[in-house]
Amino acid sequence: MEEWLWEIIPWGYQVLLGIEAWRNGLLDAVFPFITDFGSALGYVVIFSVVYWCVDKTIGQGLAFAYLYTLVLNAWIKFYFLIPRPDDPSLEEILNKAGIIERLTPLRKETSPSFLSGHTQGAVVVWGYLAYHIKKTWFWVLALIIIALIGFSRMYLGVHFPQDVIGGLIVGVVYLAIWIALEPRVRGWLLKQMIGLRYALAVLLPIVVWLIYPDRSIAEPMGAALGLGVGYLLEGQTIRFSIGGSIGRRILRAVVGLVIVIAAFFSLSILFSTFDESMGDRMEAVWRFLRYAIIGFGGGWFMPWLFVKIGLADSEISRKVIP
């Protein structure tokens, strides 16, 4: 398959050149926004709102489904190592194919090209939500968002069409497997002692990260560790209720997102001082720690704060749930 992916690069490049010819000022402003909507910060907003205000179980499952699909995507990228469309190493291939014109990407990406993580992530997130919401209108909305995010990657010139198609296929297969296995895994975990659940919440993300300790895997696995521990602790000490009026839920979402996003950028600035002075491996460690803090904050600290300031009710009175 690797050989075939290299062979179809000229075809994919010509498709991107055709898309580039459609560019204009309006679309150049719209599609970067769409692609950012399908990035990490966009999904932080979605996961937080669902977990805090809509359905805790769906919010938890959604977050883990997305974080682990990012790991799968990174593994595939680093296995095939297909260059991005603007990589100088493609010059010989393009010249042999008789392609003289060169693409001007609107973004700069450094990771391998195949397959599109934005597309794969969009399929998993919006497909997971559509599966649980079970409304025709939401399925239509989900498909439109997935298509727009996938196309935005080609419009910006950072992915070949084969990357987007691959992301769609892998995303659908991954989502189907996740949906089939999640109830069984969740049921098994609920039968285990709390100590084992904490151990798995900590050790599984670390082991998965150490299989290939790249920073692109450090981020989702750091978040998975923080969320896993946070969710467990929340269930023992808070058990906040998502109920309440629409106004109360909206206020909860606004307050929570302001704090989480502020923490996201503040920690990014703080830890960037370490990133600049350390090697790649230590940079990955700092990224893991940073995202673990953000995950724990969203999973436990914000629910605790909501209860403290009266934006949510706790289902626990005095007794701690074992």
Image (cartoon, rainbow, N blue to C red):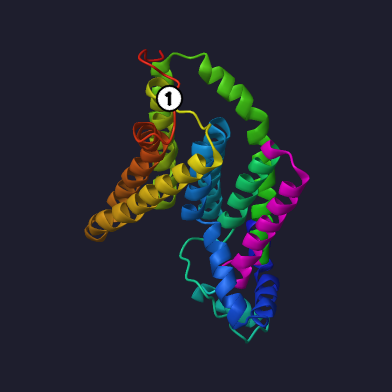
The picture places residue 105, in percent across and down from the top left corner, at 54, 76
Residue 80, compared with residue 105, is above or below; it is above
Was residue 53 drawn as part of the magenta stretch in this picture?
no
Which quarter of the rendering shows the C terminus?
top left
Q: Quadrant of residue 165?
A: bottom right
| Kind of element beneath mark 1 | loop
Q: Which residues are magenta?
A: 132-160
Residue in the image at 69% along x and 51% along y = 142
The picture places residue 246, in percent across and down from the top left corner, at 55, 41
Give whichever of 210, 253 is nearer the camera: 253
Left or right: residue 154 versus residue 277 is right
Residue 318, visible in the rendered structure: yes
Q: In the current view of this chain or complex, which residue is farthest to the bottom?
A: 100
Residue 84, visible in the rendered structure: no
Label tally: 1
Q: Residues within 10 Å of mark 1 (few under 14, many from 20)?
A: some
The picture places residue 134, in percent across and down from the top left corner, at 73, 39
Was residue 141 drawn as part of the magenta stretch in this picture?
yes
Residue 110, compared with residue 252, is above or below; it is below
Which quarter of the rendering shows the N terminus?
bottom right
Residue in the image at 31% along x and 50% along y = 281
Residue in the image at 58% along x and 50% along y = 121
Residue 17, compared with residue 132, is above or below; it is below
The picture places residue 230, in percent across and down from the top left corner, at 39, 31
Kindly identify which residue carries mark 1.
314
**Secondary structure mostly seen in the magenta stretch:** helix
